[in-house]
Image (cartoon, rainbow, N blue to C red):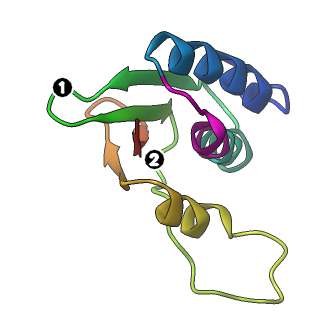
Amino acid sequence: MAPSVHAPARARRYLAERFRELGHADDYVGQLVVTELVTNAYRHVGFGLIVVRVFPDAHEAVTVIEVWDEGAELPVVRPEDREAVSGRGLPLISELVRDWGVRPLNEEGKVVWARCAR
């Protein structure tokens, strides 16, 4: 999808459909995660395409959410700053999911991923 203010809503609709297909009773955490990751991609990268993938892990009872973008800069969890107006999304995600991370792509860009319990 194109990086725009509409991208998070599109990603949420896709995630809700995939979570239903995968048998999730609740998609609330997944919706928060995909919203944050897609929002970061369009705000901090702002070019190229954003790709969202949602699939079951083959080895554990978790569902993986991946957000691919073409930006080279890796996300960073900033120290807590009570005066900041942003920067709380990744710390929130780290508390809600089994684990998360980022992997640079060989071509250009990166994949930010999170693993949510089913």
Circle 1 residue: 58
As drawn, 45 above or below 47: below
Q: Which mark is residue 72?
A: 2
Identified by mark 2, the residue type is: Ala
Instruction: Report the residue at 65% width, 61% height from top.
Output: 89
Q: Nearer the viewer, mark 2 or mark 1?
A: 1
Q: Which residues are magenta?
A: 24-34
Q: Helix, strand, or loop for circle 2?
A: loop
Q: Helix, strand, or loop for circle 1?
A: loop
Give the quarter of the image for residue 1: top right
Nearer-the-camera pick, 41 or 73: 41
Instruction: Report the residue at 57% width, 86% height from top.
Output: 79
78 relative to 117 in the view: left or right: right
Number of numbered labels in the structure image: 2
Nearer-the-camera pick, 22 or 7: 22
Nearer-the-camera pick, 51 or 73: 51
33 relative to 103 in the view: left or right: right
Neighbourhood count class around disc 1 (C-alpha, 10 Å): few under 14, some 14–19, many 20 upward: few
